Image (spheres, helix red, strand yellow):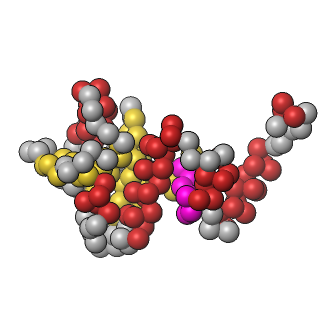
Amino acid sequence: MKSQGQSITASTIIEYIKYISEAYILHKVNRYDIHGKKLFDSNGKFYFEDHGLRNALVGGNREGDIEKILENIIYQQLIRMGYEVTVGQLQAGEIDFVCSKKGGKRFYVQTSYIIADEETYKREFGNLASIKDNYPKYVISMTPLVTKSDNNGLTHLGLRTFLMMDKL
């Protein structure tokens, strides 16, 4: 806005986001400190309810946004499955989703477009492996025809497989 000679305050932006959230265009997801086991009210992430509106607001379907779109799709599916979803905060990184249902079942989800190299593999699986508890941990990607589990409780699911599931 400054480039157009206009200024906007942080409180105005917060109010706009509040209105957009109340109109069910955006969903705010709070952060959860995995090691400290507390919920943060600030620094949440936002996910769009409608991808068509998202594309209209951000200027079309940009290929560089595929990771964000994929994360948004997975978030929506987790909500449809009935899970409560937060964003996991680690000391040295982030877990895309910490999911739970009333009654205690919890699991962690990382999203990745395609896991094609060692660096991506380490980033996506490494964050999950650093969580030392016995809850299930999933990486969901567009890597085709993948469903693999390892001895550390990590499961790699293909997006298509995940979207056809009723629950995790």
Q: Quadrant of residue 27?
A: bottom right
Q: Position of residue 4 (x, y in %)?
A: 87, 34
**Residue at 56% across, 62% down:** 50
State left or right for residue 84 relative to residue 46: left
- Looking at the picture, how far across and down is residue 55, in whole percent? 61, 52
Residue visible at 36% across and 46% down in the picture: 111
Give the left or right position of residue 168, taking residue 80 as reference: left
Q: Is residue 67 visible?
A: yes
Q: Residue at x 26, y 67 (%)?
A: 165
Question: Which quarter of the rendered picture does the N terminus lie within?
Answer: top right
Extreme left residue here? 151
Q: Is residue 58 magenta?
A: no
Q: Nearer the viewer, residue 88 or 163?
A: 163
Of the pair 37 and 92, the residue shown nearer to us: 92
Identify the magenta region.
44-51
Q: Main secondary structure of the magenta part?
A: strand
Residue 45 on the magenta span = yes
Residue at 28 percent of width and 37 percent of height: 115
Instruction: Estimate the x, y position of residue 103 in percent, counting from the top left.
Output: 29, 73
Which quadrant holds the C terminus? bottom left
Q: Residue furthest right?
A: 5
Q: Is residue 153 left or right of residue 85?
A: left
35, 57: nearer the viewer = 57
